[in-house]
Amino acid sequence: MKHTIRLMALISLCFVLASCSFIGNVSLGSYCPDLVDDQSRMLQAGDSFFYRNRDISLTNRSASLSFRGFHGIETLYRLESDQGGKLTITTTSSVDTSHYKLVLVDVMREEVITLLQGSGNANRILNLKAGSYRIKTVGYDAAGTVSMTLSAGQGVTINTQSMR
């Protein structure tokens, strides 16, 4: 009986240690620092991301993000332009790495425009052609805060990506 209890305790301990190891070291194999420069991944329709901690406020005209341990690519906004129009994007970020970007993806033309990389401030006025666009956040082991305001001219529709 003592032998069975010891064996069960040992098996339980192994299980607990293996579980803690898995939880503490979430597989981030598909994420690497090169992700921030991988335009082919940014052009993909689907998102793949992981946050250790995240607080986000997202409306059709502004976004505020605070995060730690961000890995991956997440779509924040979907934009549609029937006949073209102006889009003004004002961003401020304070992040702990240069492995972080905000990008605008032109879906139809398969182009990626960097709006902001790392920490800093930017004010961009873009003349959008007719088509579909995405604003995405891209990072590798990034932590910090980002705020963004959007102002769209006539003919440009802004929609938030559903919150996950």
Image (cartoon, rainbow, N blue to C red):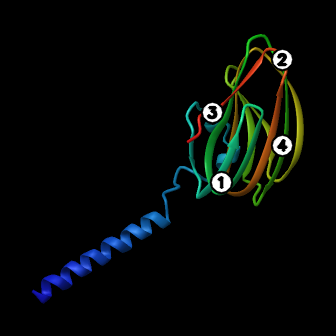
Residue farthest toward the left in the current orientation of the protein: 1
**Which residue carries the number 4 mark?**
91
Q: Position of residue 17 (x, y in %)?
A: 37, 74
Q: Who's the residue at 51% across and 54% down the image?
A: 29
Q: Earlier in the sequence, mark 4 or mark 3?
A: 4
Label 2 SS: strand
Q: Amino acid at mark 4?
A: Thr
Label 2: how many residues lie within 10 Å, few (<14), some (14-19) or many (20+)?
some
Mark 1 or mark 4: name the one nearer the start of the chain.
4
As shown in the figure, which amino acid type bears the numbered disc 3? Gln
The residue that label 3 is drawn on is 161
Residue at left offset 73%, top offset 31%? 60
Residue 18 position, x and y percent, is 37, 70
Query: Which quarter of the rendered picture does the N terminus lie within?
Result: bottom left
| 74 vs 28, nearest the viewer | 74
**Viewer-nearest of labels 2 and 1?**
2
- Left or right: residue 25 compared with residue 35: left
Residue denoted by label 1: 140
Please name the amino acid that badge 2 sits on.
Gly
